[in-house]
Amino acid sequence: MPLAKKSLKNRLMNYKYYYTYGLFDVMRKREKSLLSAFSPETLHTVADCDAERCDCLILVSEAHPVTQDKEAGLVLVDEKNFAAEEMAEPLRVLISACEETCAEKILFTSIYRTLAFQSSIYGVNPFAARPGESEHHSGLAADIKVDGYAQRRFIMSGTGKWMAKNAHRYGFIIRYPLWAEKRTGVDYEPWHLRYVGIPHAELIYRQKITLEEYLETLEPGRFYRFGGWVISRQTGNRLAMPQNAQSIRYSADTRGGWIVWGKERPSCSTLS
């Protein structure tokens, strides 16, 4: 939801959320320099059979609107909600882990939305994202709730707190955190999960940055290491990775380029 003009009541409600969870996240320390730039000794061109396309890092926002509905790559995750194929299984794993820990049933309020459906929402709620500017058009965002705790009250539930602290371990981020309202241009939405994949979610969470800021840190043509992963932002139609990279994935970066990542294969030592 775009930033609304804050009334006194709204400010007082903000304080309430600060003290239930928001204060923890606002005060949480930012880790720096988690990405280590390096120059690979040898590179090889990534063939289609060597990599899996996973467009989990695309941007959908006021600055990056979509103009048509997603027509392929959607799968049903419950009786009525569709999600992007790359998010479906990680979402099931995340929900299962949270429900097992918190003993609360998680319900989806929205996942994929068509342009027409978003238009109907915007027609009755001018503070909602305009058609074309909602992350739900990508199928990579999920709004969730538990009984008695929807919308901003969600953060007062055990599930809300668990998600805020652990979702990144499963490839998800709280896309619109309280401390980043001015950066994202969107009010705090503790119920809005966005799939960006592993290891990107951990980097975004631990560095305490937004998805936009994360993409900005990746310079075109550079290679980075993080926790056994290799990450690179590249342009053109030919993607390259170090010779020892495996489990390679790549995502469009919304600027006509690509984010490529993969695990580094452990080097073998010779036994004497």
Image (cartoon, helix red, strand yellow):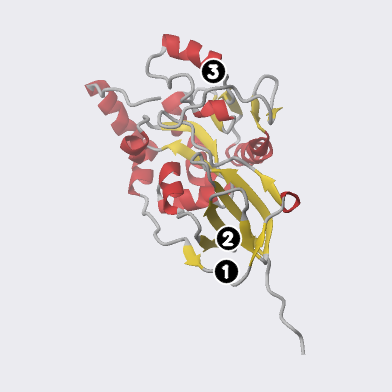
**Pointer 1: what residue?**
40
**Residue, far bottom:** 272
Report x, y in % for residue 164.
47, 41
Q: Which mark is residue 230?
A: 2
Mark sitting earlier along the chain (1/2): 1
> Seen in the image, is 128 located left or right of residue 113?
left
Numbered tag placed on residue 220 in the rendering: none
The residue at the point 48 percent across, 65 percent down is 37
Q: Position of residue 40 (x, y in %)?
A: 57, 69
Dot 3 surroundings within 10 Å: few (below 14), some, or many (20 or more)? many
Residue marked by disc 3: 115
Looking at this view, is 189 or 251 the one in front?
A: 251
- The foreground one among 106 and 37 is 37
Nearer to me, 123 or 16: 123
Tell which circle, 3 or 2, labels the residue nearer the N-terminal end.
3
Quadrant occupied by the N terminus = top left
